[in-house]
Image (cartoon, rainbow, N blue to C red):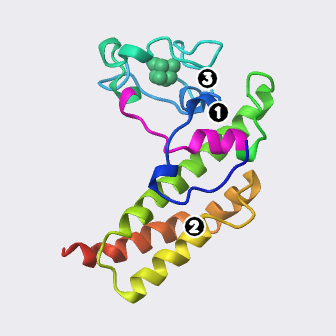
Amino acid sequence: MDYAPPRNLAELSADCAACAALCCVAPAFDKGEDFAIAKLPLTPCMHLQDNNLCRLHADLEDHGYPGCARFDCLGTGQHVVQGLYGGADWRGNPALLADMAESYRRMQRIHEALQMLFLAERLPLDEEQEIARLTLLRKLRPVDGWTPDSLAEAEASGLFTRVRETLATFRSALGG
Ligand code: SF4
């Protein structure tokens, strides 16, 4: 599968079949209202099956996992697995998992930022704000795509701080 950076809100949709269950493996979570058990990072959830499907998928809330039911990766998973790692699965290459998880964490922030920037198109932004929005969109969707290294470099260079600061400048368009 080719990776194409999302161009609109519709393309920020999860395709779990093209992922490798990264959301059920990479992050840690605490036992509580959202999750019935605690889970360590880089560890498959006890409910994840070998086919990368959740055995509780049909009734997550009833089993105490509303956090899973609510979660939306915004298409991050398939873009990391297919676009950055050529369809590799951590099951066949466990040494890849830590690197994949870091890319997943960073790419998720990019997809969240893209969602906000696409939504901001509906705001009455002034010219300066619109230029800032389009400039940031170009940064978040590099022509040659992301790589694990370029994602790490972008984070180290302060990309996510810039995202937060730019989005904060749009508040005036909300009338607040
Ligand atoms: S309960 Fe299901 S959806 Fe939630 S982390 Fe475990 S395997 Fe994934």
Name the one closer to the observer, 145 or 36.
Answer: 145
- Say the numbered circle drawn on residue 9: none
Q: Which residue position is annotated with label 1?
A: 18
Q: Secondary structure at mark 3?
A: loop
Dot 2, crowdedness within 10 Å: few (<14), some or many (≥20)?
some
Kindly tell me whether mark 3's CB lies below 8 Å from ligand 1. Answer: no
Q: Position of residue 10 (x, y in %)?
A: 46, 51
The quarter holding residue 76 reads top right
**Position of the C terminus by quadrant:** bottom left
First in residue order: circle 3 vs circle 2: 3
How far apart, in angstroms, are the residues tagged by discs 3 and 2?
28 Å
Q: Position of residue 171 (x, y in %)?
A: 28, 73
Q: Which residue position is annotated with label 2?
A: 159
Q: Position of residue 91 (x, y in %)?
A: 74, 22
Picture layout, residue 67 above or below residue 126: above
Picture layout, residue 68 above or below residue 10: above
Residue drawn at (61%, 23%) of the image = 43
Q: Which residue position is annotated with label 3?
A: 43
- Name the amino acid type tagged 3: Thr
First in residue order: circle 3 vs circle 1: 1
- Name the amino acid type tagged 1: Ala
Residue drawn at (71%, 59%) of the image = 145
Residues in magenta, as a range:
69-82
